[in-house]
Amino acid sequence: MPTKPRKYHLEIQTHRKTPYALLRSSYWEDGKVKHDTLCQISGLSLEQLRAMQAAIQGKMISKEDFKILHSREYGASYSCVTLMKELGLHTDIFSRPAEEWVRSCLAMIAGRIVYAGSKLSLSHCGAYSALWEVCGIKEDVDVNVHCYDAMDRLLERQDAIQKKLAKNICRTAPSSSTISRVPTWRASTTTVSWSSLGITAIRSVGMNRS
């Protein structure tokens, strides 16, 4: 009568200072389960022993078995948005940064830095980028709603944003050379240009013309 093939398993022992493993096989004899120890494996870390154990159990997957079917850019968009939030730009735009148009503005600014394309192309970047999801826009992006409507809101708040940026700069570095480089928002392009704010904005934060 042919005997059944033996099953092998790896027992990991951790009661010593350094872990080791026993490669064993199990078989039935006289109605009892018995074990044969084939070898002892030592000199490996616990993680390496567990990897060997998983391979013997058939739970390991080789890298050749993985196939990348689809991928999207994430890192650059996440870095830009995180930096803008650390600088407080989202609250400079509006005191309630969770509103959709504010999140859309952050997406357009980051998109301008990372991709430098048109608003229409940016609204279609979901196929290759997680930019809009990073900014909290989960639904399908509509160029009119998420870009142009958001830009209209940004334009309405342009003076308030410039004054707030000027106040922040003046608080940290109130020299005239610094004031001349305060960033001004151009809502029509959602880019930041380094130019003079103008006398009205400077006076509103307590600075004279000089």
Image (cartoon, rainbow, N blue to C red):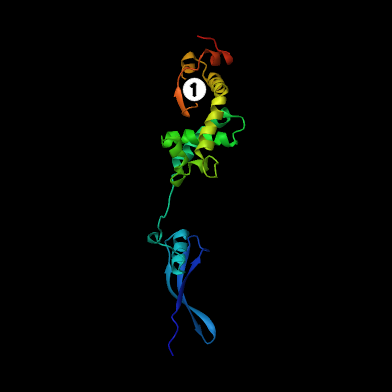
Q: State whether residue 87 is above or below residue 27.
A: above
Percent from the top left, x then y, of residue 74? 46, 44
Residue name at image x 62 percent, y 32 percent: 96
Looking at the rendered structure, the secondary structure element under dot 1 is strand
Can you say which quadrant of the picture contains the N terminus? bottom left
From this viewpoint, is residue 86 visible? Answer: no
Q: Residues within 10 Å of mark 1 (few under 14, many from 20)?
A: many
Residue 89 visible somewhere in the drawing: yes
Q: Amino acid at mark 1?
A: Thr
Residue 21 spot, x, y in % from top left: 46, 67
Relative to 125, 95 lies left or right = right
When asked about the image quadrant of residue 49, the answer is bottom left
Figure check: 175 above or below 75: above
User: Residue lying farthest bottom?
Assistant: 1
Number of labels in the image equals 1
Q: Nearer the viewer, residue 88 or 119?
A: 119
The front one of 207 and 41 is 207
Residue drawn at (44%, 34%) of the image:
112
Residue sitting at 45 percent across and 37 percent down?
120
The percent coordinates of residue 16 (x first, y second) are: 51, 63
- Residue 161: x percent and y percent? 55, 24
Q: Looking at the picture, does residue 166 appear above or below residue 120?
A: above
- Name the residue nearer the viewer: 27 or 178: 178
Residue lying furthest front in this view? 144
- Label 1 belongs to which residue? 184
Seen as rendered, the residue at the extreme right is 96
